[in-house]
Amino acid sequence: MPVLPSEPEFEQAYKELVSTLEQSTLFEQHPEYRTALKVVSIPERIIQFRVVWEDDKGQLQINRGYRVQFNSALGPYKGGLRFHPTVNLSILKFLGFEQIFKNALTGLNIGGGKGGADFDPKGKSDNEIRKFCVAFMRELSKHIGADTDVPAGDIGVGGREVGYLFGAYRAEKNKWEGVLTGKGETWGGSLIRPEATGYGLVYYVDHMIAYAGQGSFKGKKVAISGSGNVAQYAALKAIELGATVVSLSDSKGSLIAPEGSSFSPDDIMEIASLKLKHKALTAFSHGGKFKYIDGARPWTHVKVDVALPCATQNEVSKEEAEALIASGARFIAEGSNMGCTQDAIDVFEAHRKSNGGKAIWYAPGKAANAGGVAVSGLEMAQNSQRISWTSEEVDNKLKSIMEEAFKVGLETSKKYVKAAEGELPSLVAGSNIAGFVKVAAAMHDLGDWW
């Protein structure tokens, strides 16, 4: 890549994809795809703008807003908006880059993008958040549309913020259209959209477990990091399928269930209500049922069958990956984007290559957490048709999409990744290659590269 300002998160995502493609036989079979890689790695468009808004004291505040429109070969740009003080161009480029291939794995006609602002909703009143959203959308509305770019929520952007953003877009454009997903059920939203990422993650892992001949979630011990939307619904679905959930976490520390104990659905719902109020896990009154470990992630404090990082990027280190393997974990799948460091992925892949059928199964976020954007795509379809599907209809479509994402990653790995006898297929390689090939083929047919 040319010399550019340091963008560590994007560079990590880019190098992870490149190393996967280089270590496969893809470029041997299709050397022309090297050109496609160069093209797809540069956003089609980056929009950066200032957001000026007035706080409750009548003082003007200024934030930076962004939208990275990365690739539209398969459909309108699609990806969330993140409101968090750490938001910068590197993080949004990494998220948008991952989104291209994740969206391709859903099988839906959606491209990849990401956006947001360095605005922190914590500590702000509803009125201040509304004013910020209106000011943010006043500029963003010039660049999005139902057939151009369809944002959604992400960290710091929940149903409340999506409502304010949609209302501002409607007022600005005098147009009601499916320009945002994650909307409320009474004004164009899809049923089970809030649950979709967590549910989809569990559905995906269920296929991993079954393919490995290890039964199902029933009887499995599951460690989950995070305590937001994805973690909550992954926990609830895992419990529904017969698993026991033994950890949740936030940026300040982890809650660990001691031996013989686990989180109940009521515990999860109480934590969910705290998170809606932007409170930390330390505010959870569990009566001593759980052990709180300040400043720690759960991975070195649990002995589990399944690990689901659902908080943020790079939340499983090399040492934590080794600890999970040593504790007997067999399945790890990212509910967060790029949840594992490259060093951690290397640990999992080395274990896969050297331990045959007893190796750990690792699934990257671009496959395992695609359920959220999949149901966002289904929401777009419902908006276009002016109809609403039942929860059962949406859930069945979600299950089918996650099953196909698992199968295509599996089969692509077998096709392009050389494996020793008895070696498990690489889901990370298969998912990366499958998503890339689908996008590259579309770009070729559209004349984006030759």
Image: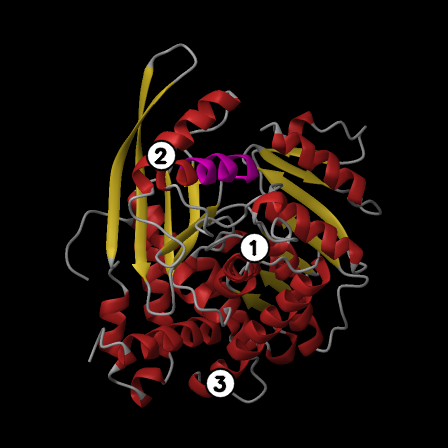
Quadrant hosting residue 446:
bottom left
In depth, the one of 74 and 386 nearer the eye is 386
User: 394 left or right of 100?
Assistant: right
Quadrant for the N terminus, please.
Answer: bottom left
- Can residue 307 be seen here? yes
Residue at image position (43%, 41%) is 82
Q: From which residue to which does the magenta span run?
A: 156-168
Q: Residues within 10 Å of mark 2 (few under 14, many from 20)?
A: many
What amino acid is labelled 3 in the image? Ala
Decide: is 81 above or below 108: above
- Secondary structure predominantly adopted by residues drawn in magenta: helix
What amino acid is labelled 2 in the image? Phe
In depth, the one of 442 and 383 nearer the eye is 383
Q: On residue 419, which mark appears?
A: 3
Residue at image position (43%, 29%) is 120
Do labels 3 and 1 touch, CB within 8 Å?
no
